[in-house]
Amino acid sequence: MSDFLTEKRDEIQARLDELAPLIAEHDRLRRALDALDGVDSSGGSSSRQSEKSGGTRSAGRPRGSGERSRQALALLRQEPGLGAAEVARRIGVHPNYAYRILPGLEEQGLIEKKERLWYPKDAA
């Protein structure tokens, strides 16, 4: 009887070992799909995302609290004429994030860009 149990345990372990890479791939693909939900090539929400949420959620990631935008604006008011990478370094975010929030502040009319440097509207 113990030979049977040992054999079955070994078979189960071998199958688990065989499936492990597939499970890891499944998890990676699920995370990638979740990241892409709500984004399509035209910039609008995907039909898949619209179906999931009943069409009420906007495309892309959810908006944050705006704290980083406030920090960037305060920094530029204190030290006008900084580049995006320097703003990112000073507020402690990845440079790509600064390239996302600074144009948003510009659209709101709070800052402006002159020759790759950012200035608050009231101090420019």
Image: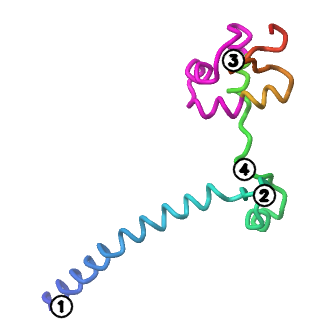
Q: Residue at x 55, y 58 (%)?
A: 31
Which quarter shows the C terminus? top right
Mark 2: secondary structure: loop
Q: Which mark is residue 60?
A: 4
In whole angstroms, how far apart are the C-alphas of marks 1 and 4? 54 Å
Q: How many marks?
A: 4
State the residue position of label 3.
117
What is the secondary structure assignment of the residue under circle 3? strand
Question: Mark 1 vs mark 4: which is more N-terminal?
Answer: 1
Question: Is residue 69 shown in magenta?
Answer: no
Q: Quadrant of the N terminus?
A: bottom left
Marks 3 and 4 in Cβ contact (< 8 Å) = no
Residue 11 image position (x, y, % from top left): 24, 83
Q: Earlier in the sequence, mark 3 or mark 4?
A: 4
Q: Are marks 1 and 3 in contact (CB under 8 Å)?
A: no
Residue designated by label 1: 4
Residue on which the image places disc 2? 45
Q: Is residue 107 left or right of residue 114?
A: right
